[in-house]
């Protein structure tokens, strides 16, 4: 028996599938819109989701993306009334198992469900460490580097333990993604995952956020409010930037760790909680302990299992994979059709040191997609310091180094040529004859090069 969620705005379709699937011995839940389906997925986990692609309130793609983000182990099958290959292929790219067209062929649907359940059974039999996907995606983390693969093998083992975890890494490396991956593989996965940035809330408010308060405990406390520790009970609480936690609050957090109890502000009654604590920091907590800025007993209580996430500069082999992921993401969001990132631009990215890590790379690619007017990301759209010299001139491409995996010389030459052609057209305000003169080309040669590179250049001849 499987838990199956049927999502369709047509009542007759929902009723038909409910009857058919119930007769097959499955437990069936129904949703009439994408929004309702997403809400149901927040309350329970399903083995299979059958979602219509076209719906007025939250389409099937939004359901698919939500399920893949929050419950990657759930199998999603798309339903389409149009038999649209394009929408089906797009759904498959986003992680759908398969699709089926209306009107249904019952035998075909049963066979598809059987295949989906068999794949799920085999996936569950595999050792958690073997679930690293060959395309470099593990849960919502993207990497093929040996450093990150070690973390991928550690995540399921850490998830199976009951110990507290400390994640160490620079800002922007993905500490919260690792924490969420651990929670989703733990016995607490059906319970809340609550996160708070200890450095992002004023000290005067942080205590009430963490531990809650009783009505009338201070000016403005017109109601009784639960704290985040209580909200996370039976689940996981993620204390981001734990190194910024004030010393006075470290005592109360230590009590929660040791005694599983705390007292809300203004109250006299203790609250018992069963919560797993995952902490993260970009600071040297050992040094803070020496400087008496962080309690030694709390540090050792939180640092039972330690996971260090390397900065992006230590795993530069991940840059092309991450850049392509963000390119596809922002092309979808902005409705652009940029096919790829040029080799020249990738070389610029790989030579950059990324002080902001993966978060900075994402921002750079988002800016590049927003600014690029051609169908390929060029270096100038990235605005990287690594490709700027004094006077704001581009580095000569002849001085660029050859990365270990080699280069595509034709691609680099084409991108340099495209870059100069576009700059000449921009300076000549689209007048091709003037652009040809700037490049010391004949008009015929300029036109040939524009056609060869697929540059659409409307304007005066």
Image (spheres, rainbow, N blue to C red):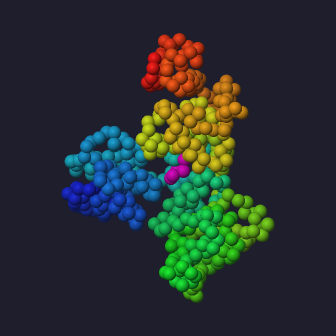
Residue 18 position within the rendered picture, expressed as x and y whole percent measured from the top left: 25, 60
Q: Quadrant of residue 417?
A: top right
Residue 402 or residue 413, whichever sits in front: 413
Residue 311 visible in the picture: yes
- As drawn, is 75 to the left or to the right of 177? left
Residue 400 in the magenta stretch? The answer is no
Instruction: Return the x and y of residue 322 as percentages of the image width and height.
Output: 55, 43
Q: In the drawing, does residue 129 fall left or right of residue 348?
A: left
Indicate the quadrant containing the N terminus: top left, top right, bottom left or bottom right: bottom left
Q: Nearer the viewer, residue 433 or 378?
A: 433
Q: Is residue 84 above or below residue 305?
A: above
Residue that appears at 31% across and 58% down? 33
- Front-most of residues 305 and 227: 227
Residue located at (54% from left, 39% from top): 368
Task: Tell me which residue sits at (68%, 64%) in the image.
Answer: 243
Residue extending farthest to the bottom is: 268
Which x, y percent locates residue 225? Answer: 51, 78
Residue 395 point in image, percent of width and height: 67, 29
Q: Which residues are magenta?
A: 138-144
Q: As rendered, which of 375 and 255 lies closer to the eye?
A: 375
Residue extending farthest right? 290
């Amino acid at each position: 028996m499987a838990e199956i969620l049927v999502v369709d705005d047509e009542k007759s379709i929902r009723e038909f599938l409910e009857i058919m699937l119930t007769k097959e011995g499955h437990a069936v839940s129904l949703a009439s819109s994408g929004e309702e389906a997403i809400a149901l997925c927040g309350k329970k986990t399903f083995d299979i989701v059958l979602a219509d692609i076209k719906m007025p309130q939250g389409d099937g793609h939004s359901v698919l993306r939500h399920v893949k983000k929050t419950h990657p182990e759930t199998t999603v099958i798309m339903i389409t009334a149009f038999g649209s290959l394009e929408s089906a292929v797009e759904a498959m790219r986003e992680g759908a198992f398969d699709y089926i067209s209306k009107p249904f062929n019952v035998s075909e649907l049963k066979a598809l469900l059987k295949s989906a359940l068999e794949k799920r059974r085999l996936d569950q039999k595999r050792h958690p460490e073997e679930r690293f996907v060959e395309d470099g995606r593990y849960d919502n983390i993207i990497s093929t580097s040996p450093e990150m693969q070690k973390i991928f093998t550690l995540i399921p083992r850490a998830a199976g333990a009951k110990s507290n975890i400390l994640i160490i890494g620079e800002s922007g490396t993905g500490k919260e993604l690792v924490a969420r991956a651990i929670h989703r593989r733990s016995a607490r996965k059906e319970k809340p995952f609550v996160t708070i940035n200890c450095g992002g809330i004023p000290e005067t408010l942080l205590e009430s956020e963490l531990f809650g308060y009783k009505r009338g405990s201070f000016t403005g406390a017109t109601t009784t409010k639960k704290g985040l520790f209580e909200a996370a009970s039976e689940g996981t609480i993620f204390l981001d930037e734990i190194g910024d936690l004030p010393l006075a609050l470290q005592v109360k957090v230590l009590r929660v760790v040791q005694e599983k109890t705390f007292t809300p502000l203004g109250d006299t009654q203790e609250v018992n909680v069963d919560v797993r604590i995952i902490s993260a920091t970009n600071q040297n907590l050992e040094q803070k302990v020496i400087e008496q800025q962080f309690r030694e007993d709390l540090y050792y209580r939180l640092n039972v299992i330690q996971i260090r996430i390397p900065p992006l500069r230590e795993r530069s082999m991940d840059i092309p994979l991450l850049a392509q992921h963000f390119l596809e993401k922002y092309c979808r969001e902005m409705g652009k059709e940029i096919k790829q990132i040029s080799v020249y631009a990738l070389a610029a990215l790989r030579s950059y040191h990324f002080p902001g890590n993966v978060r900075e790379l994402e921002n750079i690619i988002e800016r590049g997609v927003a600014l690029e007017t051609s169908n390929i990301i060029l270096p100038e759209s990235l605005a990287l310091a690594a490709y700027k010299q004094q006077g704001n001139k581009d580095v000569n491409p002849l001085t660029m180094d050859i990365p270990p995996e080699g280069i595509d010389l034709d691609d680099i030459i084409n991108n340099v040529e495209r870059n100069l052609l576009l700059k000449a057209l921009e300076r000549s305000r689209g007048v091709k004859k003037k652009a040809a003169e700037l490049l010391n080309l004949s008009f015929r040669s300029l036109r040939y090069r524009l056609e060869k590179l697929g540059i659409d250049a409307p304007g005066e001849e």
